[in-house]
Image (cartoon, helix red, strand yellow):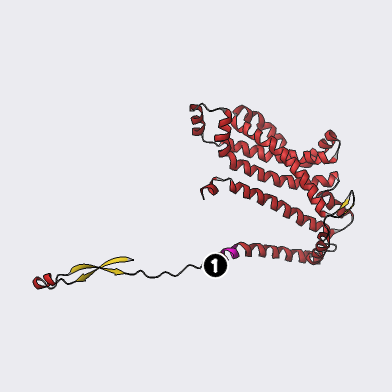
Amino acid sequence: MSVVPIHKESKDMSKANPETPKLALVEVSPQPQKPVRSWAIQGSTLMEHLVPPVFGLLFLMAIWSVVSAQSQGLPGPVSTYKAAVVLFSDPFYINGPNDQGIGWNILNSLKRVAAGFGMAALVGIPLGFMIGRFTFLSRMAAPVISLLRPVSPLAWLPIGLLVFKAANPAAIWVIFISAIWPMVINTAVGVSKVPQDYMNVAKVLNLSEWKILTKILLPSALPYVLTGVRLSIGVAWLVIVAAEMLTGGVGIGFWVWDEWNNLNVEHIIIAIFVVGIVGLLLEQGLIAIAKRFSYEEAKL
């Protein structure tokens, strides 16, 4: 409700000067506003997020259909879908040590990724904190990281087979040595970017190294650490498929190679989609964790 002045003639003043007005206050009701339709806004936002991915997938299917129609031996989306229905109708069958359902192959690959990735995190994150914290260690580790990081992951597989004398530990070793570098580098960068004012305050307060780590370095470098973890899980899942093709055993990589030997192309295409979906879920889960611990989300 608003208040506006209007002119009103006064009985006393009208005798002396009838043209002299007097101000009076009159209540004016505000104009009613149209209610905002929340469902319309939510529907528009939902369409903006769903329509582009759907069109992208349809475009991919169209290209796939055209290529399969022009190519001999490459199955199309329809035949691949029918094979997927049959395949996932019983994903956990066991007909022998090397003949198991796709569900068991995915779980075995995830176990290897979890083992190699977990060891890489246990070693890489503390090492990154030390490299970022101490200049001497940073200069000492720089040539080693620059030398070893560009090496192809599969080049480490013969070393693992030579040292561990078994395929499963060798595959875990390949995941470890491939996933450790993003965590080391991103953690070291995050620690090195901690404002110097914070470290000066820590010196004035005579804080211990443990308190500096837990109260200053870790909160400031946490977004960088989580970024390194997210990149590492993508590398680990990418590497395990190639490593299992060479080492054998039960796993999604070995399953792809075995299906190729059997000339079952539909199952190979299904495995490609499975690898992509599992990798996407792993990355999105880590992105959600990173948002949960970011400062922006905490302010909201």
272 or 274: nearer the viewer: 274
Percent across and percent down for residue 207 are: 53, 28
Query: Magenta part mainly helix, strand or loop?
Result: helix
Mark 1, secondary structure of its residue: helix
Q: Residue at x 29, y 66 (%)?
A: 3
Amino acid type shown at disc 1:
Trp
| Residues shaded magenta | 43-48
Percent across and percent down for residue 23 are: 20, 67
- Position of residue 165 relative to residue 43, above or below, is above
Question: Which residue carries the number 1 mark?
Answer: 39
Percent across and percent down for residue 197 are: 49, 33
Q: Please check the rendered image and state whether residue 53 is part of the magenta-colored stretch, yes or no.
A: no
Q: Residue 129's image quarter?
A: top right
48 on left or right of 23: right
Q: Residue 217's image quarter?
A: top right
Identity of the residue furthest to the left in this view: 16
Q: Residue at x 80, y 47 (%)?
A: 108
192 on left or right of 68: left
